[in-house]
Image (spheres, rainbow, N blue to C red):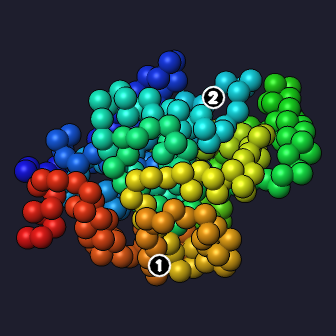
């Protein structure tokens, strides 16, 4: 099979919302939907996707992220809405069976997708165990009220021009990269931060500002509870593989808290690095592991490719 690892960019119109999509590989390859994490974008897979030979990797910018449109001011950002968006993307692509490679918050979107469709052939989670942000059962009302107060404050400041435009911008690219790395506690190498930031920056005059919706920094108004997040993991029926960073988001107790919720077929491996270990210096070995997993659940050329 002739393989093209050159990335291509597309725009999909889903009911009036444009979703930016980055793809790698031939459209005839094994279909892989790649879901990025919170405040990331499709560039999260810029290092890994070109190494997945024999695959057609489709990485959308989730709505509000990267180069995709923002939701209306009277709407919000909920994981189940992201899941519905991704189901619409899959239907637009005409995929009747596909694999998911998800990172961070994207694993939460994927766990909801698994409840919406039986077309998922396998799930591979990169440093994530489903829904990342939950609220205690008894705190839901207080959390919702606080979230809506913060949202109103942000919208009011925008409407009344209380926010200084220059406060949202950077004089140069290096300032933006510095904030990007600070956001992830220097988990990202400088060159990886540049990849992510360039897809999320808009040049304004002589400076730069973020493309993503600032409302993404606000708490989700109605997050799921920990019990609901665990139920979403438990209902997964397809093969599930967790590839976790040894210094990642789940390293200090996070994995232990949810381990009991994993379905029986789940398999777990630990990898050197932090939350973005897939953007660090182990791409080839990680890609080979992902390809071997795909080969177990996909008939045809990919199996031959891995065994060559």
- Judging by the rendered image, the residue that carries numbered circle 1 is 270
- Judging by the rendered image, the residue that carries numbered circle 2 is 71
Could you tell me if residue 299 is visible in this image? Answer: yes
Foreground residue among 107 and 234: 234
Q: Is residue 302 above or below residue 169?
A: below
Disc 2 or disc 1, which is closer to the eye? 1
Dot 2: few (<14), some (14–19), or many (≥20) neighbours within 10 Å? Answer: some
Left or right, 152 with respect to 123, comes to right
Q: Is residue 165 above or below residue 226?
A: above
* Rendered location of residue 230, percent (x, y): 64, 57
User: What is the distance, in whole Å, between disc 2 and disc 1 at their CAs?
Assistant: 36 Å
- Secondary structure of the residue carrying tag 2 is loop
Q: Residue at x 46, y 73 (%)?
A: 268
Left or right, 244 with respect to 77, comes to left
Q: Residue at x 33, y 49 (%)?
A: 121
Q: Is residue 34 above or below residue 151?
A: below
* Rendered location of residue 186, percent (x, y): 60, 72
Mark positioned earlier in the residue sequence (2 or 1)? 2
Foreground residue among 186 and 223: 223
Q: Residue at x 31, y 56 (%)?
A: 49
Q: Residue at x 84, y 52 (%)?
A: 137
- Secondary structure of the residue carrying tag 1 is strand
């Amino acid at each position: 099979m002739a393989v093209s690892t050159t990335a291509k960019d597309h725009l999909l119109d889903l009911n009036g919302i444009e979703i930016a999509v980055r793809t790698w590989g031939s459209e005839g390859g094994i279909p892989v939907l790649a879901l990025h994490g919170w405040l990331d974008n499709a560039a999260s897979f810029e290092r890994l996707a070109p190494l997945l030979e024999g695959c057609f990797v489709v990485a959308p910018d989730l709505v509000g992220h990267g180069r995709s449109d923002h939701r209306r001011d009277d709407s919000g950002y909920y994981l189940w809405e992201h899941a519905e968006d991704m189901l619409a993307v899959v239907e637009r692509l005409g995929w009747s069976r596909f694999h998911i490679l998800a990172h961070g918050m994207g694993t939460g979107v994927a766990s909801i997708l698994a409840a919406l469709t039986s077309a998922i052939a396998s799930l591979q989670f990169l440093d994530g165990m489903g829904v990342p942000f939950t609220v205690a059962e008894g705190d839901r009302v207080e959390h919702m009220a606080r979230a809506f107060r913060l949202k109103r404050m942000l919208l009011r400041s925008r409407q009344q021009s209380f926010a200084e435009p220059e406060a949202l911008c950077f004089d140069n690219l290096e300032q933006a990269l510095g904030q990007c790395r600070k956001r992830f506690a220097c988990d990202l190498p400088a060159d990886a931060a540049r990849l992510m930031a360039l897809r999320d920056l808009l040049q304004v005059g002589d400076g730069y500002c973020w493309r993503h919706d600032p409302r993404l920094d606000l708490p989700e108004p109605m997050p799921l509870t920990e019990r609901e997040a665990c139920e979403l993991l438990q209902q997964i029926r397809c093969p599930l593989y967790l590839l976790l960073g040894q210094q990642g988001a789940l390293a200090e107790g996070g994995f232990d808290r949810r381990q009991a919720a994993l379905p029986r077929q789940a398999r777990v491996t630990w990898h050197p690095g932090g939350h973005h270990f897939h953007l660090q210096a182990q791409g080839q070995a990680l890609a080979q592991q992902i390809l071997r997993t795909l080969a177990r659940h996909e008939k045809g050329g990919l199996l031959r490719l891995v065994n060559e």
